[in-house]
Amino acid sequence: MAEKVELTPAEKQKILRERRQAKMNKGKATDRLNNILSQGSSVKTSSVTSILDQEKPSSTTSSSIDQTPSYSATIAADEDPDHQDISTITPSPTEDIDTIFNKILKQQQDEHTESDPMSQFMKMFNDQQQQPTPQPQETKYNQEYQLYQNYQSKLWKFRFLIIRISAVLVNFGYHFMTIPKFHASTYINVRDYSPTDANISQFITLFSAVEVVIIASYYFICQKYGLFHAANSNNIILKIVSQGAMFLPQLKRYEIILARVLGYYDLIGIIIGDLSFVVVLFGLLSYLN
Amino acid sequence: MLSVLSVDLNPYTITLAIFIILLIQKIISFIGKSKLQQFIWGQYLKFSSNSTIKQFNDKQLELKETNRMKKSISAQDEYAKWTKLNRKSDQLNIEIQQLGTEIQSLKTSIDKASNLAIMVVTTLPIWYARIFYRKKVLFYFGNGILPDYIEWVLSLPFGLKGSIGLTIWMFAVNSLLSSWIFLITFPFENKVEKPIEPKETKKTE
């Protein structure tokens, strides 16, 4: 008696494949398919067409396929597909959330035009994202430096105020004591239009000269120590404009102009303050006449 | 009808009065209204002949004494005495709380009265002057002291050139008083030293 030869799994698969191929080559794939689909029912209801009986694809592709000799052997229906390298399919290892966000924002930037407020907002947000986060030490230093600058601004104002008051008092006192017509009165006859003493106008000349010197010095010192910026940082109008500039970048230009105007307002305030002092002195001493 | 309420005052009287009122206003705003009210209330408590307040002060003194005696004895050694003192201090606390509630309503009325007094002294006269003396000339400058254009600006809004009206006078006084208050208070502010810039940490390899 002949011994049974044990077949290896590969050989078994090969045999099965060849049988299946032989059956497919016989044809009538559609009939066999419809038989399978309508199994169990007395009436054959299925009317599908098997892919094997369908029109073959274009010649270029089919010829390339047909010309490959081992094509049918390699692409068997029941064979597991080759192990695929999924590294091309799966996404790259988790990217940094910031990088992903930046990509999205950049994409949005490219899509929209400059005039779109939303794109401007996203651009502003993106810029802020890209800015490095300040260290806590730096933040603390900036806050302390701001306080220091504010104190310095007040200190210089205090110093100049002493100089201004002294200058006005000396100038006023000298002319009040030496020139008889240098006074104010509740009566209109003080406005006597007879020729005035030439020295009477010295007061305003000296006053103007001293004011020019004081303002120039104050301006120079504030520019040198950056005190205008410190004073303006507390200004509410400037704060509102800078907040608005986050949404409307056009306001940035006006912010610079406004900061300059506020600086000049500070200087004009010196003249107004000193003139007010002169008016109060005249007013309080007007009872003497 | 409004002219009935007006009083014909010497211009210098108006000048001086406005100066003093604005000075008081600046002082009050500098001190703070709440602090002023606390001060007035403290003075009232000290000198008031109100029986509730006297009772309140007496009860507080009694409570203070009772607590001192309670702390001086041991609860274990003199339990009866301690319990008696404890009961007394609880009773005093309740009475003080009740009196405190009554006094609180008194405090509210004192605060309202002080608010009214501040308004009568500072705000009302200013408004009165603004309504009745807005066109009144307070004083005139001597001829030639100031240039024409400065005299014209200072005479705004109603006056003749070379005169000073209420508006400019009030502005000038306010400006001067603000400067003087800054001059007096700034030396008492805490000095701020220049901060030391943080050194950048270098990465060591």
Image (cartoon, coloured by chain):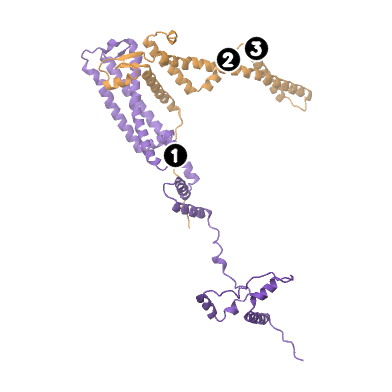
Chain colours: A purple, B orange
Chain on which label 2 sits: B
Give the amino acid type for the residue marked by disc 2 in the picture.
Tyr
Q: Residues within 10 Å of mark 3 (few under 14, many from 20)?
A: few
Q: Are marks 2 and 3 in contact (CB under 8 Å)?
A: no
Q: Residue at x 28, y 24 (%)?
A: A207
Q: Nearer the viewer, mark 3 or mark 1?
A: 1
Dot 3 amino acid type: Ser
**Residue A32 vs residue A95, the one in the foreground:** A32
Return the chain for callout 3: B
Badge 2, how many Cα within 10 Å: few under 14, some, many 20+?
A: some
Q: Which residue is mark 1?
A: A244
Q: Earlier in the sequence, mark 2 or mark 3?
A: 2
Residue A136: % across, % down: 50, 45
The relative height of residue B53 versus residue A215 in the rendered view (above or below) is above
The residue carrying mark 2 is B44
Displayed quadrant of residue A42: bottom right
Structural crowding at the residue carrying mark 1, measured as other residues with C-alpha within 10 Å and reported as few (<14), some (14–19) or many (≥20)? some
In the rendering, at what x and y percent does residue A51 appear? 61, 73
Q: Secondary structure at mark 3?
A: helix
Q: Secondary structure at mark 2?
A: helix
